[in-house]
Image (cartoon, rainbow, N blue to C red):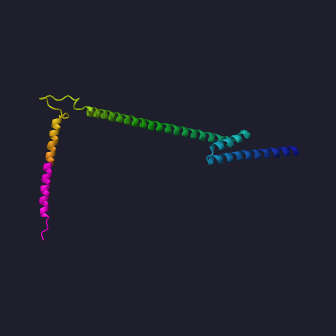
Amino acid sequence: MRVLTALFFAFIFGISAQAQDADSFFHRGANSYINAQLQQAIQIVEEGLFQYPNDAKLNALKKKLEEEKEKQQQQQSQQNQNQNQEQQEQDQQQQEQNQDQQQENQEQNQEEKQDQQEGEGSEENEPKPEEGKPLDSKEISKEDAEKILKALAQKEKELLKDFKKKKSKDSAKHDKDW
């Protein structure tokens, strides 16, 4: 009977020690999970399940930790997809801006070429308008240009004379009258 009692107590103490150790794994794993150390929590629970594979608490905690890990992986995947989509949108905007800039540059180059071509055409190379043909607004003969310049110079002289006359009349009014 003593042997049987000793075996009984050994069995009881062994179970309680086993439960306490499984609880220890459970609590350490739960604390790691609470402290946002998911990978460490999973490792601790797997260690506990290796020693105590039938423990209900450890199995439930492992299931919960695996669900959380899957959830985090889905969130990470979603974040990666969002970042990729944002990057693609930014790349597309940059590409559109580059195309717009290239188009503007091409237009400017074409305008510059046209301006150069118009400026390079000297009077000797340009065909002279024949008498009786109306002149285009851009085409003007050398004589006409000289006449216009002389008329402008004459007009400027007349305006200066008028200005001086008005100035001299105004200065007479400002003389001291004491």
Occupied quadrant, residue 100: top left
- x 57%, y 38%: residue: 73
Front-most of residues 18 and 8: 18
Q: Percent x, y for residue 35?
A: 62, 48
Q: Percent x, y for residue 157?
A: 14, 49
Q: Quadrant of the C terminus?
A: bottom left
- Whether 44 is drawn above or below 160: the answer is above
Front-most of residues 162 and 142: 142
Q: Quadrant of the N terminus?
A: top right
Front-most of residues 153 and 31: 153
Please indicate whether residue 67 sits to the left or right of residue 154 in the image.
right
Magenta segment:
157-178
The answer to whether any part of residue 1 appears in the image is no
The answer to whether any part of residue 38 appears in the image is yes
Front-most of residues 162 and 20: 162
Q: Percent x, y for residue 173?
A: 12, 63
User: Magenta stretch containing residue 65, yes or no?
Assistant: no
- x 50%, y 39%: residue: 83
- x 39%, y 37%: residue: 97
Q: Percent x, y for residue 166?
A: 12, 56
Please indicate whether residue 106 sits to the left or right of residue 53 in the image.
left
Please indicate whether residue 17 sits to the left or right of residue 98 in the image.
right
